[in-house]
Amino acid sequence: MPKRTATMLGCASLLSLLAGGSWAQTGGAVGSPEAGRAATVWIEPSVSVGATLSSNGNASSSNGRSELKLDVTPGLRAVLNTARVRGFVDYSLSAEYYLDGNSGNRLSNRLNASATVVAWDQRAFVDVSGSISDQSVSAFGPQSVTGLADTNRSETSSFRVSPYIQGSLGGWADYQLRYALQTLNTDTAIRSDSTSQVLSARLGSRPVGQQLGWFVDASAQENDFAVGRDTRSDIARAGLIVSVSPLLNVTVSSGVETNDIITLKRESYNTTGVGFDWRPSQQTSMSVSVEKRYFGTGYNAAVEHRTGRTIWRYSASRSASDSPTQAGSVSVGTNYDIVDALLSQSIPDPILRAQAVLQFLANFNIPADAQNFQDFLSSSTTLNQTQQVSVALNGIRSVITINVTRGTTSRLDSLAILGDDFDTNTKIDQQSWGVSYGHRLTQITSLNAAYIDQKSSGSSGASSKRQSVSFGLSTRLAPRTSGTVLLQFGRFNNTAGSYNDAAISGRITHRF
């Protein structure tokens, strides 16, 4: 509890910095000339009221009942770009009331926040971040199209505080020493909360214009799971970086790691790795790394090509995940992540880009935190193998995103019964594809549409499949007031049965 409290207080400090600094220097609204100044604090409170009527609010295959949900949602979006603090916050708190009682009334939090604080003389820094969102408890449990049924969802929060120092040693080497504390908490008792602490150090050098560089790094990590075993993992590496050409770098490394993740006693394993980073042009990049690890061969590959208005990406990875927020996930990221990548070249400053991304999503009425693939929670370290293809097309008045993802997840710690999906499945396969479209009809009106098809299958024979389609229309009712209407249709089936769901929702939002 003290560790979790420390991380939550760290993120609360970030909000205090944002609020306190805003009175000293406040930029204009998004899109105004003042918003692009080098040092600015932009804060935009909002409030929205909405209603959703679902034909199957209890997500039942045999006795579906309608459900009407009313909600009031105050929110705060802030972007800070000063000499001491750079970051952004997107937070909302929704009071949800269910008139037909198929789900319990509740307060629902949403948070996406990240900032870096300069603590001392451009040498000491503190990274602070936090996120709160709903996660599926099980990969095979019911999933409502509208999210009204709450039998398989859990509000999950993650907070991270990471102070570090970095600098140069007489010009011959660069160093960094970092400590990170991260906590994860879910509101379901059948999945594990966790606390992770990592102490890491890195020393290396590759002078500009020279072909050979070197590095040594080491880290020690402790993972404390509320359910199941606590684990510790230590790793140390040394490596060389060879600049074959100005466009191609090759890295080789060797080291040793010790942990008790797959055994009760700590065991040591040798590690060897090789990788390359190739950037033939400003529009195209390719990176591949392969490393022998305690779980076998791990790898990470990424290919990206950009044109003036498009991004084409392919990625593949095989790695261990110590965090339940990532365990079992083959997520292709949120809508925020996709638009952030789309604007990264035209707006290189990450803080000004965050401001532009939030406005871009608001213009097309696209939810920033919507997952393109729904995660599920586990209670231990897992092995994740994923492949993803994504395309983003940005027209003058339209934006289209396409995502195809497949992945396999298995539990690395097989020494305990933890109550999650891996008690009965040695591995879980997931596949998903989706497409979304947004179009500006006029300066004040836009429409959007999306289709998602995703399925999960376990080695035990358990399976689930969800298909959903949505159509939305939004318009500006007043200079800072907008209204939206959304139609949703979906079908879900698993080994226990199947059901259909249809819903219509309306929302009015005012930004101050």
Image (spheres, grey):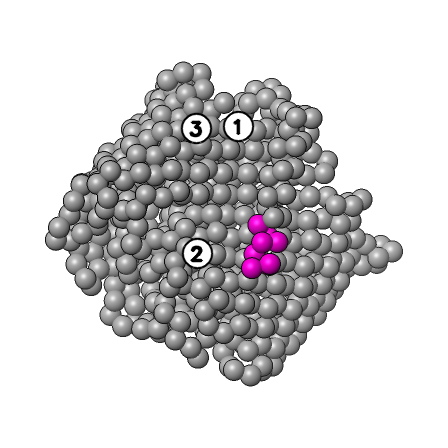
Residue 384 rendering spot, x and y as whole percentages: 44, 65
Residue 400 seen in the current view: no
Residue lying at 58% horizontally and 73% vertically, measured from the top left: 232
Q: In this view, does 309 lie to the left or right of 492?
A: right
Residue 458 rendering spot, x and y as whole percentages: 30, 68
| Residue at the extreme right | 170
The residue identified by callout 3 is: 47
- Crowding around mark 1 (Cα neighbors within 10 Å: few <14, some 14 to 19, many 20+) is some
Front residue of 51 and 396: 51
Dot 1: element: strand
Dot 2: element: strand
Q: Which of marks 2 and 1 is nearer the N terminus?
A: 1
Q: What residue type is labelled 1?
A: Glu
| Residue at the extreme left | 62
Q: In this view, does 495 lie above or below 101?
A: below
The residue identified by callout 2 is: 186
Front residue of 407 and 185: 185
Provide the residue span drawn in magenta: 1-8
Q: Distance between the residues labelled 2 and 1?
A: 29 Å
Q: How far apart are marks 3 and 1 (CA)?
A: 10 Å
Q: How far apart are marks 2 and 3 (CA)?
A: 26 Å
Quarter location, residue 238: bottom right
Q: Earlier in the sequence, mark 2 or mark 3?
A: 3
- Crowding around mark 2 (Cα neighbors within 10 Å: few <14, some 14 to 19, many 20+) is many
- In reply to whether residue 2 is colored magenta, the answer given is yes
Residue 416 seen in the current view: yes
Residue 34 rendering spot, x and y as whole percentages: 62, 21
- In reply to whether residue 55 is colored magenta, the answer given is no
**Disc 2 vs disc 1: Cβ atoms closer than 8 Å?**
no
Residue lying at 69% horizontally and 34% vertically, measured from the top left: 82
**Residue 44 badge:** 1
Q: Which amino acid does label 3 sit on?
A: Val
